[in-house]
Amino acid sequence: MPLLSGSRLFTRFFLALLVMALSLTLVLGVVFYLERSRAMAELVVDRWAPALRAAAGLWTLDDPPPSRETVVLQSAQRPPAAGSVPVYAARLTSLRDVLTDRGLPPLALAVDSRQRPATLWIELASGPTGTPRWYGIREPLIAPSPPQRILAVSGGVVLLAALLAWWLARWLTRPLDALRQRMARFRPGQTLDEGAAPLPGASEEVLAIDEAWQALARRLTRFEQERALMLAGVSHDLRSPLGRIQLAASLLPDTPEVAQRRAVIERNVQVADQLIQGFLDHARIGTLALDQAVDLTQVARQVVLQRHDAAEAAGFALRAELPPTLVLPHSHPQLLERLLANLVDNALQYGGSPVEVRAGASGERFWLEVQDGGPGIPADQHEQVLQAFYRGDPGRARPGTGLGLAIVREAALRLGATLTLHNGSPGFTVRLEGPLDP
């Protein structure tokens, strides 16, 4: 899953922290800019005010004397080159308020930025009659330029906030991600290490979740082991009388009438034995230790060769398209053999010719599929046929235990592989795809 996927907790933490940081930066930047503009406006107005009062005929003896350095331009009309005050010029907007506070309420403001420094034109009601007139003052501090330094500082703060939000989100979600990976690596039947190191940097809540999950996984493993032991014992107890029945049937007189009945007995004993073997396979799949490097190609060839003659006698073409070698570093030969045997047997029993076994690898993943030329399974039954003891044939016209694909599904889970069923036209394909090293 991509690191910045919208469904990841890390992404949500990161975006939430980033939005908070951006909002705080924006508010602080605006407040600082407005306060700074107000301070600059008070500074320049206090220097201009006496000269403006004198030029507008509003100077009194109580006012400080005008500064000779402040040159006030005058015009009866608004200068043609003077433009409106830009919306981003908060400093000029503050000038209007400060001039009003100083007793010089402007009727209008305009700026001539053709030369440097810019000229600020102020329309005031001058003289005793209050005749409007325009007064201009050249001042470097009133240039209506965007607050570049403030924007640069704000950009740096935003970048720093993004990096901090990234680090904080990683710090908060890293233990959860480590727990997710630990849970994803767990396979049914796997024994957890009692001395496993705690999750680094995890909070008490995450550690509690980890402990609860480990306790649940140990109970699941113990349950699988007890179930396998129980089924093995039951199967042994059932096979003993079946063996005696088989022996007794073989000792019956060899007459035509008895031979027919003996064949029925032997056939039913064989079906019961297959059912018991299916129980055992289903139970053992969950308890096999995946601690061996197994060549999938070698196991597949062995399964195909064992069934080749019987398939040919039944009119099936059984073929295999396999790479020279395909090693799964964490597997078990019996698990792979049962997986492939059930897939091939299902194809030979319920499918049609030809039956093809294919396997391969792409990058760090492997795939395995068995395809037959039969009618397939209705799409609405694909999930059901993976359940134990489900039979797609309600009339049970064909023998079977209903455990074949259930065993395949359990084996796929142990390997960390996904199992998909696909109907062709005609044909039916069962495909596994998973990591080479789960």
Image (cartoon, rainbow, N blue to C red):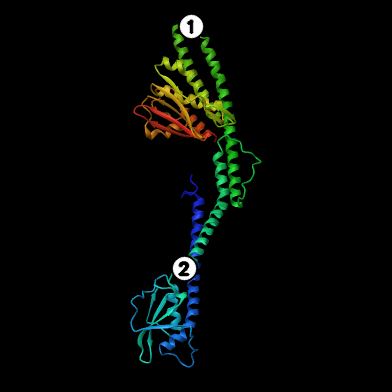
Where 87 falls versus 17 (above or below)? below
The residue nearer to you, when weighing 401 against 405, is 405
Which residue is label 2 attached to?
Answer: 147
In this view, which residue lies farthest toward the right?
195
The residue nearer to you, when weighing 153 against 284, is 153
Which residue is label 1 attached to?
Answer: 254
Where 103 falls versus 248 (above or below)? below
Can residue 91 be seen at all in this image of the molecule? yes
> Where does residue 150 sit, x and y in percent of width and height?
49, 67
Q: Residue at x 62, y 48 (%)?
A: 200
Left or right of 45? Residue 290 is: right
The reply to whether discs 1 and 2 touch (Cβ–Cβ < 8 Å) is no
Q: Residues within 10 Å of mark 1 (few under 14, many from 20)?
A: few
> Where does residue 338 sit, x and y in percent of width and height?
51, 26
- Number of callouts in the render? 2
Can residue 272 be seen at all in this image of the molecule? no
Instruction: Determine which quarter of the picture holds residue 127.
Output: bottom left
Q: Amino acid at mark 2?
A: Pro
> Where does residue 107 sit, x and y in percent of width and height?
37, 82
> Where does residue 137 sit, x and y in percent of width and height?
43, 80
The answer for how far apart the CA atoms under marks 1 and 2 are is 110 Å
Q: Residue at x 49, y 21 (%)?
A: 301
The residue nearer to you, when weighing 295 against 181, is 295
Left or right of 225? Residue 278 is: left
Q: Residue at x 44, y 7 (%)?
A: 256
Instruction: Determine which quarter of the picture holds residue 134.
Output: bottom left
In what element is the residue under mark 1?
loop
Q: Amino acid at mark 1?
A: Asp
Question: Of the numbered discs in the image, which one, if any, rests on residue 153?
Answer: none
